[in-house]
Each structure stands twice: as structure tokens, then as C-alpha cells.
Amino acid sequence: MKKYIEKLIKLVQLERNEEIKKMEWEIKNLSGFEREKKGRAILNLKPKVIGEELGLYLIKFGRSKIIETEINVGDEVLINKNKGKVRDDFKGVVVEKGSRFIVVSLDKLLPKSFKEVRIDLYASDVTYKRQIDNLKNLSENGKKVLSYILKDIKFDDIKKIDFKPFDKNLNYSQKLSISKALSSKNFFLIHGPFGTGKTRTLVEYILQEVKRGKKVLVSADSNMAVDNLVERLSEKVSHVRIGHPSRVSKKLLSSTLLFKIEKHKRYKELYKLKEEFSNLIEKREKFQKPIQKWRRGLSDEQILKLSKEGKTTRGIPLKMINAMAEWITLNNKIEKIKEEMEKLEEEISKDIIENSSVVFSTNSSSYSEILKGFEFDVVVIDEAAQTTIPSVLIPLSKGKKFVLAGDHKQLPPTIISEKAKELSITLFEILVDKYPHMKELLNIQYRMNEKIMEFPNKEFYNGKLKSGIGNITLKDLGFEGSDEITKPENTIIFIDTKSRKNKTENQKKDSTSYFNELEANIVKDIVEKFLKLGLNREYIGVITPYDDQVDLIKSFNLGVEVNTVDGFQGREKEVIIISFVRSNQRKELGFLTDLRRLNVSITRAKRKLICIGDSSTLENHPTYKKFIEFVKNKGVYLV
């Protein structure tokens, strides 16, 4: 086990170094304009303080030009003057984003000289540090989790137990998963493919554990997944959400620890100390800080003694000695109050956590100081197939038993370092493979038209999924359509570019990504056609595996969401248009051969799926060949 832990630490260090190296290289070598083009910086912003929230300053940065960026709510950013070096003196967290502004929360105000600024996406290494620290000091619970990977442990078959559901509309597979998860003594795995009600199942399971008097830690890698569960449970259980308030959805602020501290019965004591602290700091400003120039080798004690006796030494004026003595006296009081404040805040926080049946946190935040010493009866992890082993071990180290929910047939965690690729193999995947009897599949999907479901179901889920909503189409939304592509009854379409001119992919100089102008123009025509016929632009999503194709399609300003496969995971749209991009004589598919990308792309669509690609390249892979054959037989195939 020691060797395995050391290997995990090494992999985390490799990934951390790669991410920081990439960010530092970009900031050093790319101009602000180039970084903005990549979506990782925003230039020419004017700052304006718009308020304070839970002790943090909210600053709105705006400009007249529309902001196109990858920077999202919850991201850590650096704020610097528009011209000059990028430094990390001012770090903040994005709390809101509009088309011409971005709101960031900071723990200090910007200098007056920051009249025109730039914001840069920052790669924080706090998460990596926490993963490494946790691995170095792994608890017995954490070691138990690793033993499930490293040893072949014989677990008895899990028996079903009866329970009375709070949610009366659960299907059989959801109830069975909950029943087995409740019965399991060590761990249980809920395999929840697209649209099968994984979150709904977890909500019921958590309520059942709370009903049995259990204390539950609920965690996931992303803030969005955690907030999704907080939203559904906040009215039903005593709870607290750990983490930076700026990373928490605005409507859930009342669930945060900081908010609950302010509502606690002992907050008056804390507020009084905070006021005293602020007053003393203001008072201290009026006196000379004992800097080396005036101290001249004297210790604090010597300065205080000289002031008391009204004496001077080493050519220091008595006025200066008295001023420094006042500063030291006030500073000592400040330090004492600071200690009292921290102690009281810790006591209040522990009281809140102790009185909460459910604690919500991201995997990384579950390492925070405030949860030290707490052990949970159960740890529930959502998006478990998208989180690395070092990440998931942080919350799992705090629990006697755990339940993982996810879908290993969709995208794994993104790993930048080639040397650390092994991190993309998740605990969920390993345990599903090793202990299949500890898993239950949620088998009824409620997202999409059954014809769109048919291919991924056969190809990736052994035909085990059933449709819970049948033949839904755009007609149900009052849309008529006018041709083969837009008619609601044509739910799955493949547009083959194999016989068209200029069908081949291209690459920009110094880019590892690809773009395809023909496919981008076909996407543009289709989107414009739908919009002209009155379809709500919110209903349309465009997915393409390559960043450069995303940029090209975005440059058309169609007003619909365009993103990579990774960017669309966990999401859905009524109409999905996929541009596969790859078209070459070598018949190379690149990372399209990772079939989980195909699965995620197809399964984002609810009522209509339109695929654009060159079959002469794609059919070189047996699964893509099968997919194109499927559309020819069951859907609409256009050349």
C-alpha cells in the first residue's frame, strides 16, 4: 500500500507541475490579446465596488465590448493593471458573469491606480496540495478504501431491505439501488447513465440515511454537482454547505457555513470582537510601526520599557519611542483579539456542523480545517466517474461507509500531463469492474427520444436501458419544421460530407487542434434554418470535439451554445448538432477513438440529433461504421 500511495503522490505532482507550467508559459509567452483570444483573459475592464457579502468585497468589472471567455463562475482569477506584468497580488473568485461584465469577490480592495485592468484565469494549486497532504496522512478509512483496490476482498451479496420512500414516483431500479445502498456495510455503486434520475435517487438515499439517524457527508468534484444536491435537500434536512461563498450558487447562500455563522446565537459575541478588532486597527494606524530604521536593534520589550520610563536611546527621539510603544501595545491587543475571534469562530462552526445531519462540500473543500476531527457514518460522492482517486480519497477518508454514483461509460477526469494519464482511471471504474455485485444500474432513461437512445444503449450499455418517455419530438414544443432536417419526426440525421468539395480538416499554425470549414458552414446553415422557423435558440446546442472548431463556429455569432464534448457533459438540449471535424486521407480519427466522447455527444440530445461528418474517414473505426449504418437504417441519411 505504501508504494501505491507514493505512486499516487507522484502522479498528482506530475499533473500539478504540468498545469502550473502551462499557465506560467502562457502568461509569460502570450500577449494579453492572445490569452483573451483563447478565452483565458479579459482585457480593458473598468472596476467598480458594488458591495460587500459575507466579509468579501464584490467588484464589478465592465466594458462596452461583449465578453467571450472560458472564465466561469467559481473560477479563481488574477487581477492586474491592463499594461504591465501579470502578478498574483490580487486573487479573487468569479461570482457572476454577464455579456459585458464580470463580478469578482476579493478579500481586499484594489489600489486606486487600477483604473483599467485585465482579469486572467488562474491555476490554483490548493487542490493538488490538499490531495498530496491527504495521501501523506491517510486515515484508516482512506486506507480501507485503497485495500478494496489492492486486495481481493470477498463481500457477501447485498440483501434488499424494505424502506418507505419519501419520493412516491421512484421506479423499480431506483428503489432497488437505494435499498441495496442502505443495506451495504462497506460501499455501494450506483451506475446512473444519462437521464436515469441519478440525482433523484441520491436525494432519496440521503433522506433515508438521515431518517436512520446517520450523519452524511455529500461531495463531488464540481461546485455545480454539489449545489444541485443542496438545492434538492436544503428544505428537507438540517445541513451546511462548506466552501467559499463565491463558489456557491447565489440562491443557496443561506446554506453556507459563513451565512449560518452570522445567524448563530453566539454571533453577537463574535461581532463585538470584530468591531473591537477594526477599531484597534484604525487606532494603530495613527502610530509609528517599529520599522528597522527607528527600532535600531531594540526589541518590543525594550521600547515599551523606555517609553514607560520616559527615556530615550541610540538617538531615537522620545516622541518616536512613545509612538512605537503605543503601536506595540495596540498590536498586542489586536493579536489577542484575533486569537479569541478565531477560537470563537471555530467553536460556532463546530456547533453548526455537529447539529447538521448532512454536510455538503466539494472533494477539495472537505479537507478544510473546519472538518478536521469529524467522522461521518456515510460519504456520498456524485460524479464519481469524473473524479481522480487522490481527489475522491479526501472525502472518503472521513467516512465509515461510502456510496459512489456516476457513469464510467462517459468522460473520465481530464488529465493534462501525459505522464499522469493513469489518474484518469477512477475508483468508480475499478470497483465496478472488480465487485460487480456491489453495483446497481438505473435502467430507465427520461431524457431522450427512444430512437436517439437506441444506438448508445446497444453499444455502451448492453441494451439494458429502457425508455421512460417514448417518442418525444419537437412537435410537442409546437415546432413544425419544413424539410428533411427540420421536420420533428426525423429525430436522428447524419449528413455525410464524403462526396463534397473542401471537406477536409485543417490545422492552424502551432495548434494541435483541428477545424473543418465545410462542417462549420453546414452547422451555421442548420442553426439559421431552425431560428428562422421560430425555434427558441436556448433549445439548440452544438458539440464538436475540437477547440478550434468551437472557435470557428462561435465566430458566426449564432447565439446558440457551442462547446466541446467535455463542456457539455452532464447537460442536455432539445436539439444537438455534432460536427465530427475529422476528414483526411490517412483516415485518422485522433481522440474520436475514445468512444466515451461519442456516447456523451449523442446522449445530450432530447428530441433531435443531427450529425455532420465524413464517413470515408469515420468508418475506419468499427463503432462509427456501426453508427452510420444505424442512421441509414433507422434515421435520415443525407449526402
Image (cartoon, helix red, strand yellow):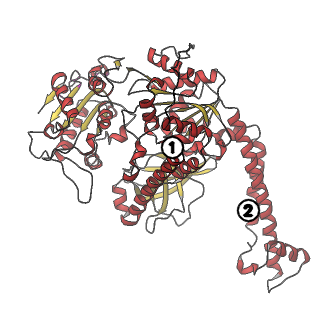
Q: Residues within 10 Å of mark 1 (few under 14, many from 20)?
A: many
Q: Residues within 10 Å of mark 2 (few under 14, many from 20)?
A: few
Q: Is residue 221 left or right of residue 600?
A: right
Q: Is residue 486 magenta?
A: yes
Amino acid type at image mark 1? Ser
Give the main secondary structure of the magenta stretch.
loop
Using residue 194 as the reference point, say whether residue 178 is left or right of it: right
Q: Is residue 175 magenta?
A: no
Task: Read off the residue under disc 2.
Answer: 282
N-terminal-most mark, 1 or 2: 2
Q: Does residue 308 lie above or below 567 as drawn? A: below
Q: Please give the name of the residue rendered at 31% of the width and 21% of the height, measured from the top-left corner.
A: 463
At label 2, which amino acid type do we have?
Answer: Glu
- Residue at the image position 44 percent from the left and 46 percent from the top: 72
Q: CA distance from mark 1 to mark 2?
A: 42 Å
**In the displayed structure image, the side of residue 480 where residue 350 appears, left or right:** right
Q: Which mark is residue 391?
A: 1
Q: Nearer the viewer, mark 1 or mark 2?
A: 1
Can you name the residue that lies furthest to the bottom here? Answer: 315
Magenta residues span 477-491
Q: Position of residue 407 (x, y in %)?
A: 41, 31
In percent of width and height, residue 489 lies at: 22, 20
User: Hey, which quadrant is residue 328 in on the image?
Assistant: bottom right
Element at label 1: helix
- Pointer 1 and pointer 2: residues touching (CB < 8 Å)? no
Q: Nearer the viewer, residue 45 or 30?
A: 30
Residue 136 vertical placement versus 221 (above, below): below
> In which quadrant is the C terminus drawn?
top left
| Viewer-side residue, 366 vs 409 | 409
Where residue 343 appears, as percent x and y from the top left, is 75, 48
Q: Is residue 189 visible?
A: yes
- The reply, left or right, for residue 18 in relation to residue 583 is right
